[in-house]
Image (cartoon, grey):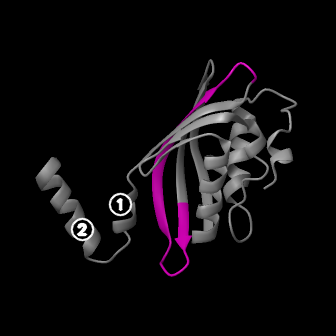
Amino acid sequence: MDSTNRDVSVEHRLTLEIVKDLWSRTYNTAGNPDWTHILPYYDKDIYFRDSIQELHGIDEFTAMTERLTKRSKDLSMNIVHAVQEGNTVFLEWEMTIKFKKNPSSVLYGTSRLTLNSEGKIAAQRDYYDLWGDIFDNIPRFGKAYRRFMKKRFG
């Protein structure tokens, strides 16, 4: 994506309904996911963190979305619940992801979005159990993993 698209001004402040619509369209495209319509809503200094990585800036964030697009054969997002309180939006989601050589896996998680004074996403924190949700889809291994986790940490 070229930098001119990233600098597009947001015509409206993000609202809960706009966020839900953007997230649904990001992941429910035919084929690979597409973030081009949502990236203009991110601040150029976006701070992003999830179970795998911590990123700073729109260039790193855009690169991450491009890596995920290349790895994924298909990806869909179901927004289960969404609430907004002030400049914070919480999304509960179910993401179904199919990597190129593996069966589909459902990841269950939440995202906390922090909006800045311009209404852009200044910070995003995603919470999910990547390995547990993926391992659950591997016959016999998923049950063994859950038994181990319960015995060791539960």
Give coordinates of residue 37: x percent, y percent.
79, 49
**Front of the two marks 2 and 1:** 1
The quadrant in which residue 118 appears is top right
Q: Which residue is denoted by mark 1 in the rendering?
A: 131
**Total numbered badges shown on the rendered structure:** 2
Q: Residue furthest bottom?
A: 101
Which SS type dominates the magenta stretch? strand
Q: Is residue 18 above or below residue 146?
A: above
- Which residue is rendered at x = 67% and y = 42% of the image? 58
Q: Which residue is denoted by mark 2 in the rendering?
A: 143
User: Mark 2: which amino acid?
Assistant: Lys
Chain part drawn in magenta: 96-118
Q: Is residue 114 magenta?
A: yes
Describe the element under mark 2 as helix, strand or loop: helix
Q: Which mark is residue 76?
A: none
Describe the element under mark 1 as helix, strand or loop: helix
Disc 1: CA contacts within 10 A as few (<14), some (14-19) or many (>=20) = few
